[in-house]
Amino acid sequence: MSEIQPPIRTIQQVLAAAVAVSDGDLEAAMLWYRNEPLALFDYRTAESLVAEGRATDVLNLFESFQAGFVG
């Protein structure tokens, strides 16, 4: 059984937001996207959340970062 990939556009949106909060560092954004466990989401990565169709949740997380939330 093959996994269904999220649309590339969705991945690009999340990565663009990650780059924006990482001072333009694409490499850091990619590492974060693929490897950083997110406590707010039961320690799943952004990549796994996007694959589950939860890109909006990840994008909302970036909005909270920009508003000053550091959790």
Image (tube, rainbow, N blue to C red):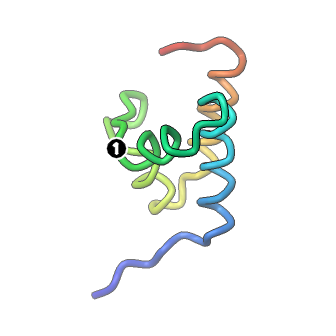
Residue 27 x %, y %? 50, 44
Image vertical order of residue 66 relative to residue 8, above or below: above
Q: Looking at the image, which residue sits at the far bottom?
A: 1
Dot 1 surroundings within 10 Å: few (below 14), some, or many (20 or more)?
A: some
Q: Nearer the viewer, residue 71 or 12?
A: 12
Q: Residue at x 63, y 22 (%)?
A: 65
* Residue 18, image quadrant: top right
Residue 52 x %, y %? 45, 60
Mark 1 lies on residue: 35
Looking at the rendered structure, the kind of residue marked 1 is Asn
Q: Is residue 60 shown left or right of residue 41? A: right
Q: Is residue 27 shown left or right of residue 57? A: left
Determine the secondary structure under disc 1.
Answer: helix
Q: Residue at x 60, y 14 (%)?
A: 69
Q: Residue at x 53, y 13 (%)?
A: 70
Q: Nearer the viewer, residue 10 or 60?
A: 10
Residue 15 x %, y %? 60, 49
Q: Residue at x 68, y 47 (%)?
A: 16
Image vertical order of residue 36 relative to residue 54, above or below: above
Residue 34 x %, y %? 39, 49
The mark tally for this picture is: 1
